[in-house]
Image: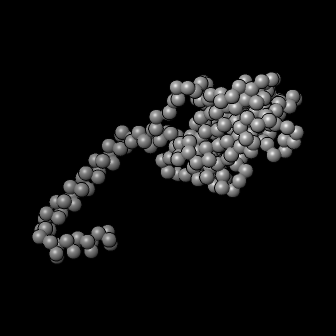
């Protein structure tokens, strides 16, 4: 009110608007705001409903979709034994904030199509079925064989729990990658938190 009163005084002093007209305009505005508020309570704006803020989920015709909502396609089919629960897998991966400008937050260490030899200490490892990684990774690795590359579109519910990449792997290995991913996951605005991953299975270590 302390901001409005000086403005009203200025309008009355320096314009041809009468006090009665000004009061009529104010009452009309209050009436409109009141009914707009009631309408939004009864009919919530679709864009604010649910985790996806009302956005239509993108479906890609060349991707397979699982019951959980994970979409994936094989960029290269591998050869050899597929991992099972309890096995340790060694993977290389890329990550992108596909729902927000497609920013990369992790780049694979090895050249596509290169061979995997010897030391795996620089690659990401996890035990299948032990909830060490996000649900999308657990699901995507099943059915892959060494040398295979699988691309997946990950909705928020199959990604990082509580929008925190420290709770489950994979975690970006660089500060810039962590910052890019964290910006999207922790953003309170109406942005799309869908992620894209390329995962390459390098080795399966039987349990």
Q: In the picture shown, does residue 186 fall above or below 137?
A: below
Residue pictured at 65% horizontal, 30% vertical = 75
Which residue occupies the foreground of this view, 196 or 139? 196
For residue 133, what is the image quadrant? top right
Residue pictured at 36% horizontal, 39% vertical = 43
In which quadrant is the N terminus drawn?
A: bottom left
Image-based side of 88 in relation to 154, left or right: right
Residue 153 appears in the rendering? yes
Residue 193 appears in the rendering? no
Image-based side of 58 in relation to 94, left or right: left
Which residue occupies the foreground of this view, 200 or 2? 200
Residue pictured at 58% horizontal, 27% vertical = 63
Which residue occupies the foreground of this view, 55 or 120? 120
Residue 31 locus on image (x, y percent)? 24, 52
Residue 206 locus on image (x, y percent)? 87, 28
Which residue occupies the foreground of this view, 172 or 28? 172
In which quadrant is the C terminus drawn?
A: top right
Residue pictured at 32% horizontal, 45% vertical = 38
Q: In the picture shown, does residue 71 fall above or below 47?
A: above
Residue 136 locus on image (x, y percent)? 66, 34
How many labels sit on residues?
Answer: 0
For residue 47, what is the image quadrant? top left
How did the renderer colour the structure?
one colour
Residue 9 locus on image (x, y percent)? 22, 74
């Amino acid at each position: 009110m302390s901001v409005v009163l000086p403005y009203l005084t200025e309008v009355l002093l320096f314009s041809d608007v009468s006090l009665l007209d000004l009061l009529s305009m104010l009452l009309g505005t209050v009436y409109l705001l009141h009914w707009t508020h009631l309408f939004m309570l009864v009919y919530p704006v679709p864009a604010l409903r649910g985790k996806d803020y009302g956005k239509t989920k993108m479906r890609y015709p060349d991707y397979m979709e699982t019951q959980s909502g994970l979409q994936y396609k094989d960029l290269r089919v591998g050869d050899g034994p597929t991992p099972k629960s309890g096995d340790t897998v060694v993977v290389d991966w890329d990550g992108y904030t596909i729902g927000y400008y497609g920013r990369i937050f992790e780049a694979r260490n090895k050249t596509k199509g290169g061979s995997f030899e010897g030391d795996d200490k620089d690659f990401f490892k996890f035990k299948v079925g032990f909830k060490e990684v996000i649900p999308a990774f657990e699901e995507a690795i099943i059915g892959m064989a060494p040398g295979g590359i699988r691309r997946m579109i990950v909705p928020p519910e199959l990604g990082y729990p509580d929008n925190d990449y420290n709770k489950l792997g994979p975690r970006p290995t660089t500060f810039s990658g962590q910052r890019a991913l964290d910006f999207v996951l922790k953003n309170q605005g109406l942005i799309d938190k869908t992620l894209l991953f390329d995962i390459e299975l390098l080795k399966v270590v039987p349990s």
